[in-house]
Image (cartoon, rainbow, N blue to C red):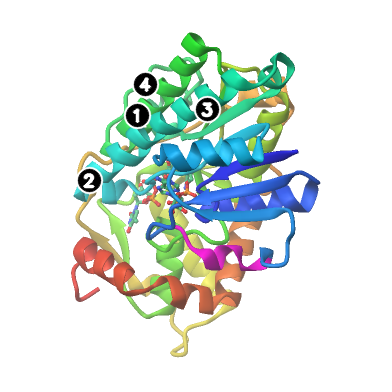
Amino acid sequence: MTILVTGGAGFIGSNFVYDWLADRDEAVVNLDLLTYAGNRWNLNGLLDEPKHVFIHGSIGDAGLISSLLDQYRPRAIINFAAESHVDRSIAGPAQFITTNIIDLFQLLECVRSYTKQLGESNRDAFRFLQVSTDEVYGSLGADEPAFSETRRFEPNSPYSASKAAGDHLVRAWHHTYGINVLTTNCSNNYGPFQFPEKLIPLIISNALSGKNLPVYGDGKQVRDWLYVGDHCSAIIRVLDEGIPGKTYNIGGQCEKENIDVVRTLCQLLDELQPRSDGRSYAEQISFVKDRPGHDRRYAVDTTRVEAEIGWRPSETFESGLRKTVDWYLKNANWLDHVRSGAYREWIDAQYGAAK
Ligand code: NAD
Ligand code: DAU
């Protein structure tokens, strides 16, 4: 049997493919467009893995998707493919509408044709799992309860609005066409292979390069952090045991203010790779202009996935962050490789050329 993973050269997708192949006999067909965020280097550890097939292409290419579905007959699709960075969605929303809505629509239409041709038992067994975000629910006040699956959608950024639209499409393809879909809405991930435009790898990368550590606004925005391996284990559990048509919130029950995350990273770096002048990396922290429409707080209520699926995270923030910093220190080549020309253009545009 085979599964089709889309976006499997990105951060969470590549972690998922490694975890899946370490644990299962089922082959993975991995389709990725290799945008700036997708990287064949992330998959170098699979060059000799016969159960892994990499295909370069888009979920929006209906001809390609239909031929892949005909050829490989996957029993499940896990869709990680997306534009995923909020700041980029603010600077240029168009690509987010294309990828997260229109390309997803094309993928769903191909799945609809494919599942029509399956015999009844294969059609019943087929699953389409949409990897989504807690950001579809909007922003929480300091005392509001965490997001449950029944909270209404109130997306605030072009990114979260495009993901919310995608979630609605997936839901509609279940209710109207009977496709067995599952949706997971997860909080902020961190871990190996995360592109250094997101907070945690950006801070590690800037700290080691002697650059400013940019903290937006007052730094008191709250995010709920989850180690990427725990997100992947939740996706696998939901794929195995989730009820088609249902959505599952996933999170670490680990709310942290951004400034505390940045200070903790500085402490870890002070311990693991001290600055040559003996001073703390915390001296590089710099408060900068806030993100427009910046969501104040995310927190995820994981009661459903815990009670119905029995999933729980295995890393604490302390253990996961130490593993992550350690990985970036040991993989300086990877960091150099992804900080290419296109990366520098983004950093200059977002933070100013001097940073
Ligand atoms: P990422 O940006 O690191 O990776 C996205 C991948 O999708 C890249 O490899 C890219 O090349 C690929 N891609 C983009 N457009 C494509 C297309 N049209 N066809 C095929 N491949 C395409 O993102 P990530 O952080 O790994 O996130 C993966 C998914 O998880 C996204 O859907 C995101 O919304 C969701 N998510 C992310 C987080 C997080 O904290 N990173 C949390 C919750 C949910
Ligand atoms: O909540 C899940 C979401 O988490 C995912 O759906 C997104 O794909 C993922 O990118 C992430 O979104 P955020 O916007 O929360 O992540 P980011 O790492 O960009 O920012 C985390 C917090 O840190 C946020 O409050 C903004 C702040 N920040 C970020 C950057 C890049 C800074 O203060 N400085 C920075 O330079």
State the SS at label 2. helix
* Amino acid of disc 3: Val
Q: Position of residue 336 (x, y in %)?
A: 45, 78
Q: Position of residue 355 (x, y in %)?
A: 25, 73
Residue at mark 1: 138
Magenta segment, which residues?
38-45
For ligand 2, tell me if the residue under mark 1 lies within 8 Å.
Answer: no
- In-image side of 55 versus 45 (left or right): left
| Mark before the other along the chain sequence, 1 or 3 | 3
Q: Mark 4 sits on what residue?
A: 153
Dot 2 amino acid type: Ile
Whole-percent x and y of residue 196? 42, 63
In contact (CB < 8 Å): disc 4 and disc 1:
yes
Mark 2, ligand 2, within 8 Å: the answer is: no
In the rendered image, is residue 190 in sight?
A: no
Mark 4 crowd level (few <14, some 14–19, many ≥20, 10 Å Cα): some
Q: Which residue is mark 3?
A: 111
What is the CA distance from the residue labelled 4 to the residue labelled 3? 25 Å
